[in-house]
Amino acid sequence: MPEHSTYYQPTISTSAQVKEKGIKFIGFTFPVVDLNEIETHLLALKKQFPDATHHCFAWQIGLSKQQYKAHDDGEPAYSAGAPILGQIRAHHLTNVLVVVVRYYGGVNLGVGGLISAYKTVASLALAQVVPQPIKQTLNAILTFDYAHTNLVNRILHELKIKPFNEVFTETCEWQIALPENELSAIQNRLQILQQKGFSISITVLSESVNR
């Protein structure tokens, strides 16, 4: 996915249809978050359109650690899946599956014609998507002495962060999820406290995506 300040995920499924020289292209979009959902939609469309010539598709899930795939389903290489994936990225979308079902109409469009047709129907279907902005979030653990509990609570309250998986011992560990762009703010707060002798630290565990 190209660099962009905000990314989006679809909230509804959509469809669009294009006819090119008697050849029918039907495009579908689906919100997805994992491979199981993708496979379910692909199987459903194959059952719905069992006599179609091709079921070409592309999907992309995740943000910084993206997974994606483009599939031509027997069309000439890079003539179907790649243009579909290109439209997903042009719309700055992730967590989305786009499938284009094609019925052969007896006319050969050539590679250039196929690329144009798959790109067009994917674009029309994606243009109907109701996009939802998503933010990169980080999972992290705050480690601190039990005596600093009130102080940590106050900092998290000011940053509007709610802890979960709270473990209370002499050294407490609280797991938190925070927007990536707020990591530096909490790190700066903790660094000031560390310089004053407070035993408080933060460890980033992983990246995730808000759904």
Image (tube, rainbow, N blue to C red):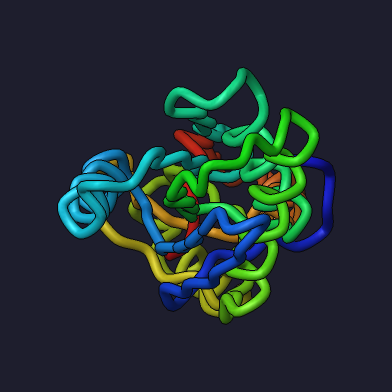
Query: Residue 46: where, in percent of width, then height?
Result: 23, 47
Q: Residue at x 48, y 72 (%)?
A: 15
Q: Position of residue 1 (x, y in %)?
A: 72, 40
Q: Is residue 2 left or right of residue 196?
A: right
User: Is residue 13 among the parts visible in the rendering?
Assistant: yes
Q: Is residue 196 above or below residue 133?
A: above
Taking the spot 54% from the left edge, 69% from the top edge, the residue there is 17
Q: Position of residue 58 (x, y in %)?
A: 51, 40
Q: Quadrant of residue 85?
A: top right
Left or right: where does residue 149 sit relative to residue 88?
A: left
Visible residue check, residue 139: no
Name the residue nearer the viewer: 144 or 134: 134
Against 129, is 198 above or below?
Answer: above
Foreground residue among 60 and 53:
53
Q: Is residue 76 left or right of residue 189?
A: left
| Residue with the most extreme left position | 47
Give the answer, above or below, for where 174 lies relative to 133.
above
- Estimate the x, y position of residue 28 in percent, counting from the top left: 45, 63
For image coordinates 42% across by 65% down, the residue present is 211
